[in-house]
Image: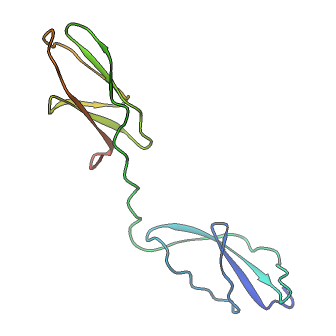
Amino acid sequence: MTGADGYQVQRDGTAVGYPTSVSYTDTGLQSGTEYTYLVAAVTSGNATGTESAPVKGTTSGKPPPPPPIAPPTGLAVSATTNTSITVTWDAETGAKSYNVYADGSTTGVAATAPTYTQTGLQPETKHTYQVRTLARACMHA
């Protein structure tokens, strides 16, 4: 832009710098993350020129781990018979499956829906249930 006194650098749609030269180093970024940049010339009167075509860049290193998945909430008994109990819970965003525990031991079930029915129980017996959310094999809440 004729008469440009500097430049506006945008990262992912947000202005992050105003260099006066044609070079800019962006800092404080997440490793292993892709960013999109645009640049526009700026005059001393704060007039901004046309934005450049977007350019993408990825920082080196491994990306940050995903945010932890919350443990399931709303665990409740939704149905019973003489020999079975059905428990349900609120589905959690990001959950791939749920490990269900009955009376402190795993049931061996990786439920993909927020419900589990335990059958073959003795009539008039009490049981406790716990559910863990799984995002993938190594992450649980």
Foreground pick, 40 / 131: 131
Q: Quadrant of residue 66?
A: bottom left
Place of residue 125 in the rendered image (x, y in percent of width and height, measured from the top left) = 14, 15
In the displayed structure, would residue 21 be above or below residue 120? Answer: below
Q: In this image, 29 relative to 51: left or right?
A: left
Looking at the rendered structure, the number of numbered marks drawn on it comes to 0
Place of residue 22 in the rendered image (x, y in percent of width and height, measured from the top left) = 68, 89
Q: In this image, 96 relative to 38: left or right?
A: left
In the displayed structure, would residue 113 be above or below residue 49? Answer: above
Q: Quadrant of residue 77?
A: top left
Query: Residue at left 41%, top 39%?
Result: 92
Specify the color scheme: rainbow
Place of residue 79 in the rendered image (x, y in percent of width and height, measured from the top left) = 32, 14
Foreground pick, 90 / 136: 90
Query: Residue at left 42%, top 34%?
Result: 91
Place of residue 28 in the rendered image (x, y in percent of width and height, measured from the top left) = 49, 78
